[in-house]
Amino acid sequence: MDVKLYVGNLSYDTTEEDLRELFSGAGSVVSVALIKDRDSGRSKGFAFVEMGSQNEAEEAIKLYNGKSLGNREIKVNIARPKEDRPSSGYGGGGQYGGRRDQNRNRRSGGGGTRRY
């Protein structure tokens, strides 16, 4: 069973290939996902590395947690499951069901007859 690892405190210059090469020393690397900023395309300083087994993941943690990579001491541990983020209340659904936008438009004096 594949095990996903969180790898944090990465240098912005670290590439997916750098991580693949490093973690292959602990076993089979199934995938590497370097997380990047949507707008700039620049690394956010963390990644997810998927190892082929639990034993390989534990070996990677033992070998690389606290290791220096690109002049940064990286953090490696088992990735936590993705949590559902609460809705901001804007747009459809969520706590307010999109009503905040509707209320804002109503208060802005945009045409139509007001009904109270």
Image (cartoon, rainbow, N blue to C red):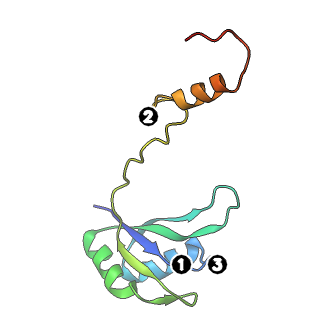
Do tag 2 and tag 3 residues touch (Cβ < 8 Å)? Answer: no
Q: Residues within 10 Å of mark 3 (few under 14, many from 20)?
A: few
For the residue marked with disc 2, what is the amino acid? Answer: Gly
Please name the residue that numbered disc 3 is placed on. 13
Q: Nearer the viewer, mark 2 or mark 1?
A: 2
- In this view, the residue in front, 69 or 60, is 69
Q: Name the quadrant of the C terminus.
A: top right
Q: Which mark is residue 94?
A: 2
Spatial CA distance of label 2 from label 1 is: 34 Å
- Which structural element holds mark 3? loop
Q: Is 40 positioned to the left or the right of 25 in the image?
A: right
Residue 10 got which mark?
A: 1
Mark in front: 2 vs 3: 2
Between 108 and 81, which is closer to the camera in this rendering? 108
Please tell me how crowded label 1 is: few (under 14), some (14-19), or many (20+) other residues with Cα within 10 Å.
many
Tag 2 secondary structure? loop
Which SS class for mark 1?
A: loop
Q: Quadrant of residue 28?
A: bottom left
Residue at horizontal 42 percent and vertical 48 percent from the top: 85
Amino acid at pointer 3: Asp
In-image side of 82 versus 14 (left or right): left
Q: Mark 2 and mark 3: span between their CA atoms?
A: 38 Å
